[in-house]
Amino acid sequence: MAKMNMLHAINSALDITMAEHPQACIFGEDVGYFGGVFRATSGLQEKYGKHRVFNTPLTEQGILGFANGLAAFGAPALAEIQFADYIFPAFDQIVNESAKFRYRSGNEFNVGNLTIRTPYGGGIAGGLYHSQSPEAYFAHTPGLKLVVPRNPYQAKGLLRACIKDDNPVIFFEPKRLYRASTGEVPEGDYTIEIGKAEVVKEGKDVTVLAWGAQMEIIEQAAAKAEEAGISCEIIDLRSILPWDAETIAKSVTKTGRLVISHEAPITNGFGAEIAATIQKECFLHLESPIERVCGLDTPYPLALEKEYVPDALKVFAAIKKSVEF
Amino acid sequence: MTNPNNISLNISHALEFIDGHALNIPTLKILSEDGDILDGATAPDLDKETALRIYSTMRFIRLLDERMQAAQRQGRISFYMQCLGEEAAITASAAALKQEDMIMAQYREQAALHYRGFSLEQFMNQLFSNEKDLGKGRQMPVHYGSNELHYLTISSPLGTQIPQATGYAYGQKLKHIDAQSGELSSEIDNVTICYFGEGAASEGDFHAGLNMAAVHKAPVLFFARNNGYAISTPADEQFKGDGIASRGVGYGIKTIRVDGADTLAVYAATQKAREIAVTTGEPVLIESIAYRLGAHSTSDDPSGYRTKDEEAEFKSNCPVARFKAWLLKQGWLNEEEDEVQKDKIREEILAALKVAEKIQKPALEELVSDVYDTPIPALQKQYEELKEHIKQHPDAYPITAGRIK
Ligand SMILES: Cc1ncc(C[n+]2csc(CCOP(=O)(O)OP(=O)(O)O)c2C)c(N)n1
């Protein structure tokens, strides 16, 4: 075990992958010698050479098109999109190509070797274009997997699982936690299963669910709720596609209540899918309507970020509303 | 001979490939580093008043950049980007345009905006995202914009302004269509200039924008700022071939490369490019070669990817000093007066900063306005709920709580 922040943990997962497979490549804007604008790939070019860890020209469309080709060839393609906000120029390559490679070819070809890493989310005073959480756009696309870690341990284990998974995966990294979150992480290899939610804390009155950077927020809210005598079961979804409806349903069957939180705008956010499924699965066990605490249906602002984001106070208010219904 | 492929065939019997680096486009340079007109070069027609306005804009932006870079270090603003090293390229190109020509910039072109008349107060209000910011505090610092000054508000995603510039310029041309005959007039009043970095020129939008401009004949001036780096990525990891200029040629666009640290060369090239665009309705590409003297932004540390020696080499080639030397030789500028002016501007910047910093942030309703022309019902409801929440917890939302009715 070693104390690592999330960037070190990600770097370690990438390092293991590069050592394991002689054709694995890491590429993206500024990821080469500089190690990426957040330094997630620091030191890897020195170790594995310019042929396998390299800067790309500034073209997300090109990065993902290239990655699809490289993965179709059979090499592990570890593509970085500098900010999740800039994944949209690559939308066509991901949604129409990565996601459908296997299906349209009858599995004559596939890009299972593709892993896309990208920092997402707010809290860094980044305004409109450095704060978005675009997971729901991709969650509407069969053929992709979407994973979001909440801390360094999860980040390394989940990233390794994404890389080993035989499907294209987008790994959304909560950039606000890159350096803020530290913890004990094994130096060697391990994986965490994709598609499984984690019950982070057991409780009996209400289930509170989030992923990635919102985990910290719901934990703070749950702590406030505990002070008010409300027992919260806290769940980290971890994987958005596929998502673990079973674990959530089991928890809600026990608590009778569910509060979901995400940073992305509420309308058609992934919380909507969860709410619809859980109200069907748990209809007779629900004691109150499922609450969602999410971003507003506006672009992510700068000056009024505090007002916009689902903070602990808003989540706490929703927990109370749910329990007092 | 022209065939249906739209290529004039030049038949050859030799199995020969044209080298990808075969083009070697010349670089227009007029002014020496010491401020003299070079032998064989012709100075553009630049009057004293315009020349001094260009100079005072460059000087102002230097001082503003210096001060705001420091303000970011002090934690007073969250982010900043300097124009350092490209002041001549940006200011002289903007000066060669008409006030009503459209400017679509990438982000590092504050000098063009100031040349147009964006005031110190307006810069400060945007940088501090206060309630007087024209962008209503929604975007990061340096994402300026002004409809009045024909300067499209900056959008962070790179390259997006390039095809937009083509479309806008096409609109400028269609303004002159004769309703009866459907014919275009041979002269156009206004053009669009579109600034972008050599990095952004790798984006798909660049290729789409240039191709459409060439095919549909849009009077747009593509101004590529080749400053050597895209964050940490040096130009030789960004493209091969002869710079961005060769791409203009490839798309069938009239192209010129200029020394971007040479105010007179940039002014002359842009003036001529504008003339071509208004008389033919066609696009022109200008590639400016000037080193990015500063860091990419305040989030960047260039010592991680370039050497002190390299930086020092280019620091000695200062575009502002070069133009100043020429102005002094012209007898249009006086060293002592210049120093007095500098101090005065520094004081004004400091004073404006202190004022802008104290102006309150935008009101809560600016969070939901402008998403649509009027907030849709779901958003209106979210807003009411948010107001209720803030009213109940005013201490947690000090920026807006006190002003909620
Ligand atoms: C689509 C997109 N991808 C990535 C970024 C992140 N980014 C911001 S500036 C920049 C480098 C731009 O370099 P260049 O176009 O050469 O302009 P310069 O900064 O050198 O003036 C990058 C990669 C972005 N803003 N938009």
Image (spheres, rainbow, N blue to C red):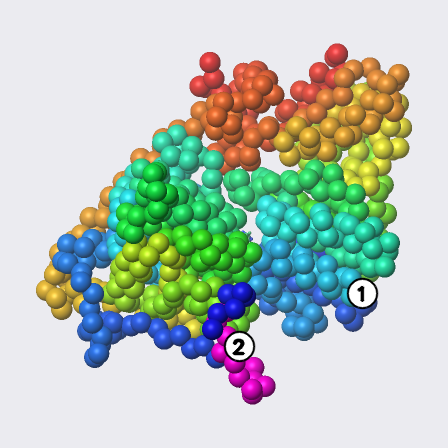
Q: Is residue A39 magenta?
A: no
Residue at mark 2 to residue at mark 1: CA–CA distance: 30 Å
Query: How many residues crowd mark 1 within 10 Å: few (<14), some (14–19), many (20+)?
Result: some
Indicate whether A286 appears above or below A210.
above
Q: Dot 2 falls on which chain?
A: B
Q: Nearer the viewer, mark 2 or mark 1?
A: 2
**Residue A311 percent coordinates (x, y):** 62, 29
**Residue B297 percent coordinates (x, y):** 46, 54
Q: Mark 1 highlights which residue?
A: A74
**Residue B101 percent coordinates (x, y):** 31, 47
Q: Amino acid at mark 2?
A: Gly
- Residue found 20% across the figure and 65% down from its top: B44
- Residue found 44% across the figure and 50% down from its top: B166
Same chain for mark 2 and mark 1? The answer is no
- Residue found 85% across the figure and 41% down from its top: A196
Judged from the image, the secondary structure of the residue bearing numbered disc 1 is loop
Indicate if the residue with disc 2 has its beta carbon within 8 Å of ligand 1. Answer: no
* Residue B213 or residue A223, whichever sits in front: B213
Which segment is the magenta one?
B7-19
Q: Dot 1 falls on which chain?
A: A
Q: Is residue A167 visible?
A: no
Residue A258 located left or right of residue B356: right
Q: Which mark is residue B20?
A: 2
Residue lying farthest left? Answer: B331
* Residue A120 or residue A219, whichever sits in front: A120
Q: Is residue B12 magenta?
A: yes
How many numbered marks have been drawn onto this rendered protein structure? 2
**Residue A179 percent coordinates (x, y):** 63, 49
